[in-house]
Image (spheres, helix red, strand yellow):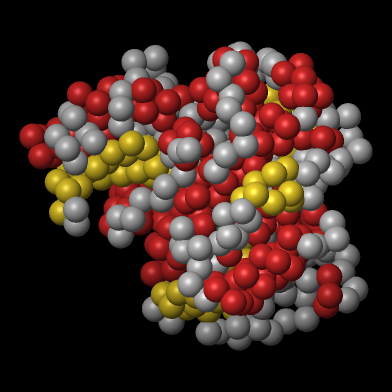
Amino acid sequence: MAVASTMFSLSLPSFDNDAVHVRRAAEIADASAGMSSPHPNYGCVIARGKEVVGEGYLYAEGTKCAELQAVEMARDKARGAIAFLNLEPGDSYGNNKSVVSLIQAGIERVVIGLRHPLQHLRGKAINILQSQGMQVNVIGDDLQMNSIQSYEEALKSCLLVNAPLLYGTAFGVPYSVTKYAMTLDGKIACTSGHSSWISSKLSRNKVFDLRGRSDAVIVGGNTVRLDDPHLTARHGGTHVPVRMVMSRTLSLPNEANLWNVDDGYTIVLTQRGARKNFQELLRSKGVEVIEFDVLNPREVMEYCYSRGYLSVLWECGGELAASAIGAGVIHKVYAFVSPKIIGGKNAPSPVGELGMVEMSQALNLMDVSFEQIGRDMLISGFLQPIPDMIPVIPFKNDTTSIDPMVTSYDANIIFFYKTWDSYGVFSNFSPHSIHMPDKNGQDYEWSTVEHYYQSQKFIGQTDLTTVHDFVEQIKLAKSPEAAARLARMLQKKHSNLVRSDWESVKIDIMYSALKCKFSTYPHLKALLLSTAGSVLVEASPHDLFWGGGRDGEGLNYLGRLLMQLRAELLSGDLSTCET
Ligand SMILES: NC(=O)C1=CN([C@@H]2O[C@H](COP(=O)(O)OP(=O)(O)OC[C@H]3O[C@@H](n4cnc5c(N)ncnc54)[C@H](OP(=O)(O)O)[C@@H]3O)[C@@H](O)[C@H]2O)C=CC1
Ligand SMILES: Nc1c(N[C@@H]2O[C@H](COP(=O)(O)O)[C@@H](O)[C@H]2O)[nH]c(=O)[nH]c1=O
């Protein structure tokens, strides 16, 4: 019985090069950061084994897609080769150019880092490729089943290169980075407010690069009054971010570098009704002024997102930085630390009042990096992890291929989890025994599907005595929960005794147990059939493989198998319990 594994293409590719090439695709995709917004950054590598025969990345919105560039570079070497993409293509112009390029070039297999984060595009390109007979592997999906370090690193590069799109899709605000330069004694300016310069020229060049990757750069009114900044990206890149000033009072100078819109577009965000005459003055210089009922970082970020900005660099002082961090809109921090001491009791620090009274309240950065830049040290890290958007229930196309009766996103979703729920008998913990072979191949009555499934982890191993003992213990466990707990504990402690092909057979094993359960009990079969047309989701918040997760982030394999079984039952060719 191999239905399940072929349908879900569970088998993990054994190609060592996959991770390396996907990382490369992410690396080249990054070359256009800032230029391609609001489109994602796309890279494509075409390789034959280790040899890269074609590469391309989306340079900017409206330019030739990465896949076509790579195919053109690879020429006839593309036929039978493998294409590596950091992100599933999204069809922006209705011509499927990316996908068509790969198909026409005769690419044999496609390895994709991440599914597209936008719901209406997710799975679409993958489906088209698969329908053309191409093998498609998605690293993000495969990782849900197997933790492989090189895959994790490849996935991380894919997440990083499109972090703005991922944060935006998940939270409805742009990806926000706060950057500051401070002295070794933690000051961002002298008591007088003077701050140019704390960090070295090399570090400041790096800041130009950060600006060039951003859609907008923000400062507060005080920074405009004290620094008169330009906020341009003067690193030779062609992208200049929009410059934004948040000022409630609007007591800003009549003349300022930011009002020179030849250098870059400027938007001033202010409180409704503030200094109307000054607003007119700014507008006469070509500066856009936007009034807010309540001017705060969250409102501003939501506004920026609605305007299409996906990444924002906060280059403000400590007061506004604290306000933005406190509002939860900052995702990453870049701190340039310079080996200088300026002292000063009232000299400002990078983050103002956050109201913390104990160290236990400290915000701990994640994934921290240290980079020496000349005499300075750049410390960076995340305040909020990059949302990993992998599977969301239901995948329209996936679900349709499992059960053609489920046809649309707005299909009814039936959740089940606890056995006492309305559809709780769909759970593997439901008290319905099944007759399946035991370790000796003899027919045995297993108390639940869970008992049977858990025991199979150890079947077929050579250390017979120990393994038989494990299977026996699981078999006799007092409850399905106890069986699962025991098996997981044994699996962890004696990983060498778990059958080596477990990951590739577990879906088939589960399917045969479910098939047995639903063919044994007519009322269960009737209930399953009564759900026709609905998506079934095991609402487990913890199990992201069999369950749908708390927010639809799980793979929901149990729900998928039940839908597959339902389709098989409806087509009338269900056999009895078998392995
Ligand atoms: N070393 C470094 O990396 C940097 C140093 N600096 C230094 O920092 C000092 C300025 O710091 P600071 O005054 O904290 O910075 P900002 O001017 O960047 O931020 C504070 C100002 O932002 C405006 N604002 C609007 N909405 C809010 C809100 N919800 N919460 C807080 N502020 C809001 C106000 O402007 P308004 O008063 O007009 O209403 C307020 O005065 C200067 O000395 C500057 O040189 C600044 C940036 C970087
Ligand atoms: N003082 C300081 C920074 N200050 C930031 O840079 C802004 C000035 O930018 P610009 O006018 O474009 O050169 C200033 O307003 C503040 O936001 N940045 C740094 O990398 N290092 C430094 O030492």
Residue 548 appears in the figure: yes
Q: Looking at the picture, does residue 307 appear above or below residue 114?
A: above
Q: Looking at the picture, does residue 104 appear above or below residue 253?
A: above
Q: Looking at the picture, does residue 97 appear above or below residue 326?
A: above
Front residue (pair 59, 7)? 7
Q: Which residue is drawn at 22% across and 34% down?
A: 107
Front residue (pair 381, 316)? 381
Q: Looking at the picture, does residue 31 appear above or below residue 202?
A: above
Residue 530's quadrant in the figure?
Answer: top right
What x and y, as percent, mark residue 550? Answer: 75, 43
Q: Which residue lies furthest to the front in this view?
A: 442
Q: Residue furthest left?
A: 76
Q: Residue at x 43, y 77 (%)?
A: 372
Residue 356's quadrant in the figure?
Answer: bottom right
What x and y, as percent, mark residue 427? Answer: 77, 40
Q: How many labels does the image show?
A: 0
Q: Residue at x 55, y 30 (%)?
A: 118
Residue 553 appears in the figure: no
Q: Residue at x 31, y 23 (%)?
A: 132
Indicate left or right for 110 with 172 as reference: left
Residue 239's quadrant in the figure?
Answer: top left
Front residue (pair 343, 242)? 242
Indicate left or right for 66 with 113 as reference: left
Indicate left or right for 379 with 452 as reference: left
What x and y, as percent, mark residue 519? Answer: 69, 29
What x and y, as percent, mark residue 338? Answer: 53, 79
Locate the C terminus by quadrant.
top right
